Image: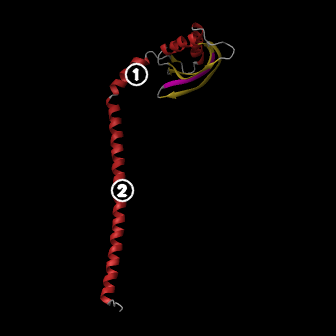
Amino acid sequence: MAMMVSQREKAMLVVVGILLLYAMTIGVSFKRRMAEIADLRETRARAERELADKRALVARRDDWQRNYDAISGRMPVFGATQRVQTHWMALLNRLATENEVTLLKTQVGDEKEVGGVFETTIDCDCEGSLEAFVPFLHAIYSEGAMLDVRKVSMRPQSGKGAGGLRATLSLCCAYMRADE
């Protein structure tokens, strides 16, 4: 016995199918929109955190200015056309001699300006004992923020016994230029 489906039931089935397709389309669209809204909320929260961080930095402007004023007086100032390499190399040579470290090779990098403060990098190879390097590095550190050791690499020096070391240093020298 075959079951007969009337025209009215077929029409109803088509309408229900169309409604199901429409509901699925709306559901997928709704899900996509909710994901976009979640992404936008996350982006907004991140932007609000960044804005709060920046506002906190701006609120501390007086502290930053006080720190800058305290340090800038100790920062060496050179003329606009004056060569600064001689100053830094003389200082480095003096510290090395005082601490019995031998400078083998030095290379002065290019001058870079960062917000009104200039930086020059000096890469040097040197040798000495551990007992000489410790006070040498301390002497560099004691010169203040104007001379900063950015990278140190030490290795045993062949043929010099247990205490001989060979080092590669990367020093950053900070200074200002006078307006002429």
**Above or below, 5 relative to 130:** below
Residue 21, how many percent across, how many down? 36, 73
Q: Which residue lies furthest to the bottom in this view?
A: 1
The secondary structure making up most of the magenta span is: strand
For label 1, count other residues whose C-alpha is less than 10 Å away and answer few (under 14), some (14-19) or many (20+): few
Q: Residue furthest top?
A: 98
Q: Which of 65 and 1 is in front in this view?
A: 1
- Which image quarter is the N terminus in? bottom left
Residue 35: which numbered mark, if any? 2
Q: Nearer the viewer, residue 26 or 77?
A: 26
Q: Give the range drawn in magenta.
A: 117-126
Q: Residue furthest right?
A: 159
**Above or below, 78 relative to 26:** above
Q: In this view, does 36 lie to the left or right of 80?
A: left
Residue 169: quarter of image:
top right
- Residue 83 visible within the image: no
Residue that numbered label 1 is attached to = 68
Residue 126: quarter of image:
top right
Element carrying mark 1: helix
